[in-house]
Structure formats: structure tokens, C-alpha cells
Image: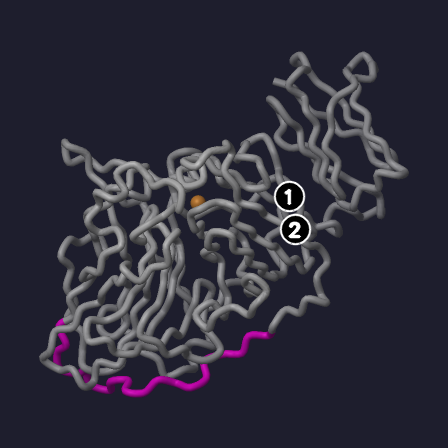
């Protein structure tokens, strides 16, 4: 289950995410629990605990929201232009969400004060991390404690310092080294420093929180020795060329999202290590549904302090390799997959996304027999099989028969407990998949 933390929601329709999120179908979810409740933290919504949802938007010549441009020249905080906040002169909590389609922020304050990061995407950190700058990529969340007690009657600005953003990050001064994006250099916000939110510091409240706890929670590290399955996710351009390295279209493991394909099958209860490698010239925030992960290493080194804790988005820089570790401990479903994808919404819509099933071998395996489910069913181009046990290529064979019992030779992709069968050439009708030790599985070709 989720820890207390700052989450968000938005629709995920195929090719529609960017447009729908840009038009405002998104919101924050605040989760509370007993661990968080036991801490002396600001938690009075709108008084000392504030949602800060930051989005930049693009408009066309008729002032309609447009997507897939690099002209996001309008900044909104909580859906407001020129936003300001009256905040009391005490320790306040900012729940930061970057809900932008593409822009990564490098936040700080106009007086350069330090603040304390107390939570990452998936909840509290073990200890606060004090800093004066924090990067937040699209999809990422943070909670900060900001001590305003010595600034009463002053105005401070939450700032974006994108002039210090590493090149290659979307909205740094430069993206690719060999090419740039159309219109990118014309956007005055790219690579620029600008005000995000005006904070008017007002009188403190009664019973104000004035200190920052030194310890927040305990996070038990998942050890590499517990890993049951490792996977690699390579981000690359689907076409070769200098422009493609920055503009895409991009894929993961050389494929793009296909509604008819389950890309990965995960066994419920397994610990997995996923290594995300970026072979493009732009940074991509990799996001996974269903679980929170711990970053094990970034290019072989320990993650930076701001990346430590439970996360579900990690910004992978060009030529970088990030390994995270996670446990798939709940919410198995043999039919409905989860997604992993780039959280730059234009990339996601263009197909920089894959799907995975989490299957529970015990719930479908009473007789200790191999069982399986065909997906999708009916099928158009491909049928994926989710199997309750790992497939043994050396002793098991897969055969597909039509209703007359004729063996149909088909192209198959076999890996462990995942089978993908190319059925595009089949005529419409019902077919049977036969695997040794498995009851027949039927599927319908549309
Ligand atoms: Cu991307």
C-alpha cells in the first residue's frame, strides 16, 4: 500500500495524455498514515501545508492550448497565472508537483535560503535533505519544509533556475549536442531564471511548527542479493539521425507502445532490478506504475541525496544508466497490465511506453499445473501469453491449432514466462494454443 505522501492523478488515454493533462485534467492526492501522523509536521491544508502544482503551457495563435511544441511560455501554479501565496512566518510544508508536459525545473528561493526535502515521490525520506536547489522533472513530487520564521512582512519568490539546468534536460539552454528542437531557442523561458510563485510572509499562526525533525521514517533497503529478476530498459530513437536523437520518436528496448502486446510479465512477490539506459540526447523521466522503487545506482555511483527514498519517477540523463530495485508485492492481475513510460507527455503519447502484467502464480495454480492467459482476446496482431511459471524452452513447445485441428506455423517470441505470438496473418476465427503441461488456451482472431 502507499505510504503517506504527495501523489497525483491524470487520465492515460492512448495518444491523449498530453492534451488532457495540458487542458487541466489532473490533480493532487495527499495520502496520510500513522507514521506521518506521529511526526511534528505542518499538516493544516492551506494554512501551513500547501499544494504547489507547477505547469507550463503552450497556446496557439487563437489562444487555444496546444501540445507537442516547445513554446510553453505560460507558467501556472495551481492553475493560476501570476500566483501568490500568503504564508505564515514559521515552518511551512510545500507539496511540490511538476505537472508540466516537458519542462524540468531547478527550484530555489530568491533569497537563496536552504530548505529541507522531506519526501520524494513515494513518501517520507529517512532524514531531511537540506539544500538551496532541487530539480523536479515532469511527474516527480517532493515535499519540502521551508522555515519562514525570520522573514515576516517580506516577500520571497520561489524561483526556477533553469540557467543552471544540465544541458540535455528539457528546457535547459541546450538540448541535443548535434541538433536542437524546432522553436526551442525562441522560447524565452528555456535556460532562463524566472519567478514561479510570490510568497508574502505574514504573521505566524497559533501553535506554529518551528522546528524540522531530524529523523522522519525508516526505509528498509531492498538488497541486491534479493533480486529474482533483472530487466534492462534502453531508451533510444526509433529512427537514426541527429534530429531523431532529440526529437524522437523514441522507444524502449527498440519498440514502441502497442496495445496488443504485453512487454513484460512480473511474478507477484518478486524483487526486481531494472536498469534504465538513455541512448538519446535528451533526458527522459522514466515512470513506473504500481510500485515505488529505490535507486541503487546512477552510472555505477550511489544516487544523490535528493534521489534517495521511495520514488516512481527518475530522470535519466543522456548517456546515463540508472538501476532501481523494487518489490512487486501487491495488486496482481492476470489481464490488466500496468505501464512504464517516459513522463514527457509528448514522448509517452508517441509511444515511449511499455506494459507489464503482475501475475500471482499461487492464485491460479491450485493443482500445481502450468496455467496461462491469452491477452488481448480477441486479438488483432499479436497474442501474448502470461504463464504461471517460467517457460522452459528446452522441454516445452508451443503449438497453435485452428478449429479443424490443423497446426498453424506462426512466429513466436519466447522468453521465460512470457510468450508473444504473431497472429496478424491468421484469418478471423477461434484458435487453440497448446503447450506441454498446460490446458488448451483459446483465443479469437478478430
Ligand atoms: Cu522522453
Residue 159, by quadrant, is bottom left
The image quadrant that residue 338 belongs to is top right
Of residue 112 and residue 147, the one placed in the foreground of this image is 112
Q: Secondary structure at mark 2?
A: strand
Q: Are marks 2 and 1 in contact (CB under 8 Å)?
A: yes
Secondary structure of the magenta portion, mostly? Answer: loop
Instruction: Say which of 132 and 41 sits in front.
Output: 132
Say what secondary structure mark 1 lies in: strand
Question: Is there any visible trace of residue 289 in the rendered image?
Answer: yes
Q: Residue at x 55, y 56 (%)?
A: 321
Is 146 on the left-hand or right-hand side of 226?
Answer: left
Q: Which residues are magenta?
A: 200-220
Q: Is residue 113 magenta?
A: no
Where residue 264 is drawn, which disc sits there? 1
Disc 1: CA contacts within 10 A as few (<14), some (14-19) or many (>=20): many
Residue 83 relative to residue 275: left or right:
left
Q: Quadrant of residue 186?
A: top left
| Quadrant where the image shows the C terminus | top right
Rounded to the nearest whole Å, what is the CA distance between mark 2 and mark 1?
A: 9 Å
Q: Residue at x 67, y 33 (%)?
A: 384
The answer to whether residue 353 is above or below residue 201 is above
Residue on which the image places disc 2: 231
Front tag of 2 and 1: 2
- Name above or below for residue 297 compared with residue 345: below
Q: Is 213 contained in the magenta span?
A: yes
Q: Is residue 25 left or right of residue 200?
A: right
Viewer-proximal residue, 164 or 87?
164
Amino acid at each position: 500500500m502507499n505510504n503517506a505522501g504527495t501523489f497525483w492523478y491524470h487520465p492515460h488515454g492512448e495518444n491523449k495524455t498530453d492534451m488532457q493533462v495540458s487542458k487541466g485534467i489532473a490533480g493532487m492526492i495527499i495520502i496520510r498514515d500513522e507514521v506521518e501522523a506521529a511526526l511534528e509536521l505542518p499538516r493544516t491544508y492551506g494554512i501551513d501545508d500547501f499544494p504547489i502544482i507547477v505547469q507550463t503551457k503552450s497556446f496557439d495563435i487563437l489562444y487555444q492550448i496546444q501540445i507537442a511544441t516547445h513554446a510553453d511560455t505560460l507558467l501556472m501554479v495551481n492553475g493560476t497565472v501570476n500566483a501568490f501565496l500568503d504564508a505564515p512566518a514559521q515552518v511551512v510544508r510545500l507539496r511540490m508537483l511538476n505537472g508540466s508536459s516537458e519542462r524540468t525545473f531547478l527550484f530555489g528561493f530568491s533569497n537563496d535560503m536552504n530548505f529541507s526535502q522531506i519526501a520524494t515521490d513515494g513518501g517520507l525520506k529517512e532524514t531531511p535533505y537540506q539544500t538551496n536547489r532541487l530539480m523536479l522533472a515532469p511527474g516527480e513530487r517532493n515535499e519540502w519544509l521551508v522555515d519562514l520564521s525570520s522573514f515576516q512582512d517580506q516577500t520571497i519568490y520561489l524561483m526556477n533556475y533553469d540557467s543552471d539546468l544540465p544541458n540535455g534536460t528539457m528546457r535547459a539552454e541546450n538540448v541535443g549536442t548535434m541538433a536542437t528542437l524546432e522553436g526551442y531557442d525562441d522560447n524565452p523561458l528555456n535556460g532562463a531564471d524566472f519567478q514561479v510563485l510570490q510568497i508574502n510572509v505574514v504573521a505566524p499562526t497559533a501553535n506554529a511548527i518551528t522546528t524540522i525533525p531530524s529523523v522522519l521514517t525508516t526505509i528498509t533497503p531492498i538488497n541486491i542479493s534479493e533480486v529474482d529478476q533483472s530487466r534492462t530498459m534502453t531508451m533510444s530513437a526509433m529512427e537514426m539521425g541527429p534530429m531523431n536523437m532529440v526529437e524522437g520518436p523514441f522507444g524502449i528496448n527498440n519498440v514502441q507502445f502497442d496495445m496488443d502486446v504485453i512487454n513484460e510479465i512480473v511474478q507477484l512477490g518478486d524483487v526486481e532490478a531494472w536498469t534504465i539506459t538513455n541512448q538519446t540526447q535528451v533526458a527522459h523521466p522514466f515512470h513506473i506504475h504500481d510500485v515505488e522503487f529505490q535507486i541503487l545506482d546512477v552510472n555505477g555511483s550511489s544516487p544523490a541525496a535528493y534521489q534517495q527514498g521511495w520514488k516512481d519517477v527518475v530522470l535519466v540523463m543522456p548517456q546515463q544508466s540508472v538501476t532501481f530495485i523494487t518489490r512487486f508485492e501487491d495488486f496482481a492481475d492476470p489481464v490488466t497490465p500496468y505501464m512504464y513510460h517516459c513522463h514527457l507527455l509528448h514522448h509517452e503519447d508517441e509511444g515511449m511506453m511499455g506494459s507489464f502484467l503482475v501475475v500471482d502464480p499461487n492464485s491460479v495454480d491450485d493443482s500445481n499445473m502450468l496455467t496461462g492467459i491469452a491477452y488481448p482476446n480477441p486479438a488483432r496482431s499479436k497474442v501474448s501469453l502470461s504463464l504461471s511459471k517460467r517457460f522452459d524452452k528446452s522441454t516445452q513447445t508451443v503449438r497453435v491449432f485452428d478449429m479443424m485441428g490443423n497446426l498453424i506455423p506462426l512466429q513466436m517470441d519466447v522468453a521465460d514466462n512470457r510468450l508473444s505470438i504473431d497472429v496478424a496473418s491468421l484469418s478471423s476465427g477461434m484458435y487453440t494454443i497448446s503447450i506441454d503441461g498446460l490446458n488448451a488456451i483459446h483465443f479469437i482472431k478478430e
